[in-house]
Amino acid sequence: MLIIFRNTDFAEYLSVSSACPFLLGAIVDYHLKSYNDEIAEKLRNNIYVDNVISGAENTSEAIKLYTTSKSMYAEASMNLREWITNSEVVNEFIPKEDRAFTNSVKVLGHCWNVKEDTINLSKPKAVLDQQEWTKRSVLKCIASVFDPLGLLSPVLLRGKVLLQSLWQKNHDWDEEISTEDQMKMSDILLDINKIDTFHIPRKVCELHGTVTYSLLCFCDASEKAYSAVIYLHTHQAQTSIVNMVFSKTRLTPVKKITIPGLELLAVVIGLRCLKFVRDQIRVPVAQNYLWTDSKCVLQWITSQKKLSVFVKNRVTEIKEHSNVNLSYIPTKENPADVASRETTLEKLKSNTTWWYGAKWLLEPMPDWPVYSDQQSDITEEEIEEVLQTEEKSNKETMLVQLTNVDNTERASNPPFDIDSNKYSSVTRPTRVTALVLRFVRKLKKSVV
């Protein structure tokens, strides 16, 4: 069960002594350390400013947490009040003067429905029914949504993609965007205004006793974004439960990168997210798994051939995570495919693959499908061709950006659009122009 309570005296101290919040926090931390007790350690690890968010497996443990915590803080002349749990038995045990009489509590920016034991994202106050959209208002609307766990990242991706396109169109901050973009933003706003109505079960682990925990990560990339999504796999005897706990999406860079390159980036952020979740979740994780639907990336990781600098640096980072089992998964079964593409809130609600992963994850681990490297139908020659294509496309893109200057503007504009007003002397822009010309000549030779 989830338990939330508040140190009201601590909150009052913070309000009158805004210059010393660190000292107050240090005093509480020092006081709890002096007990060398399991409950004291639990309190230390779950204090957020003046709120404590903790939990218990049963009623007796919750009551013990209440009585022990009250006595610990009382010795420091502090009072823990506004207790609330999702157990009516525990709530009845807590005196009325210490209880919070509410059905909805804010938990680290999220809303917790006590009776239903669900959480939902808070609708941002900055979201209004805009009549005219500008780049400034679009950014304000998208940045106002607080979703640190990435629960609705596939829905919020639509706004990020639109904002990136506005930057590429060189819109001014307060310039009205096109009618087509305004219609897109209006559709996105409909979903943002409804995010507080979508409730997600808070509990991700319903098993007790001897339980084995594993973290499962899935990675994917598309032309618009690359993503990673992580699930907590809980196994006991013949029962397995899988729930999504974290996801991360990133837009593809403006500078074009091949799809295999983006898949490689997805694996990198997937491994970083795995480490982050493993450090924060505070349960003994037995095994770590990562799946990608890119056979090219798996070949890069095991290849002994010379790789490009871009690929080599990221493969080196991947190999540092030796405790993670890397495997291949078909795109149709990859839940991260949802996060790398845009979707609506209504579609995401009914997408069981996103919330619980592939169906075979509920089966015993020995029965999980395995796609070995021998099943890969991509050859070493194709891998080499992808590398050469990637390097050549990068060079050609840079060459076009440097040499594609309109002939009609050459007479009035300086070379390569270098603004001489930004330099303090004539010598500096002259040197920059010379260096760019030298670089262009080298690119022409290498491309040809």
Image (cartoon, grey):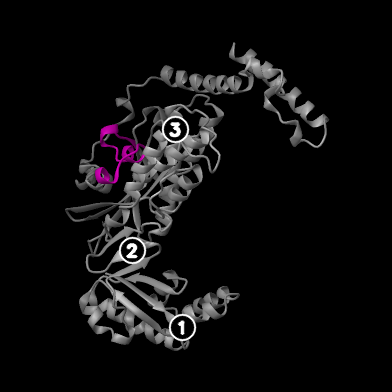
Q: Nearer the viewer, mark 1 or mark 3?
A: 1
State the SS at label 3.
helix
Please state, as top left, top right, bottom left or bottom right, where the C terminus lies in the image.
top right
Q: Residue at x 42, y 73 (%)?
A: 51
Q: Residue at x 23, y 82 (%)?
A: 92
Q: Which residue is mark 1?
A: 9
Residue 147: % across, % down: 39, 53
Residue lying furthest left in this view? 238
Question: Which region shows up in magenta?
Answer: 327-348
CA gap between label 1 and label 3 equals 51 Å
Residue at 23% x, 40% y: name it.
Answer: 368
List x then y, in percent, for residue 429.
Answer: 77, 29
Q: From mark 3 to mark 2, how far is it between C-alphas?
A: 35 Å
Q: Is residue 322 visible?
A: no
Mark with earlier residue (3, 2): 2
Residue type at numbered disc 2: Cys
Q: Which one is earlier in the sequence, the residue at label 1 or at label 2?
A: 1
Looking at the picture, tell me which residue is in the foreground, 38 or 180: 180
Q: Position of residue 152 (x, y in %)?
A: 34, 49
Instruction: Specify the amino acid type for callout 1.
Output: Asp
Provide the secondary structure element on which disc 1 rests. helix
**Tag of residue 111:** 2
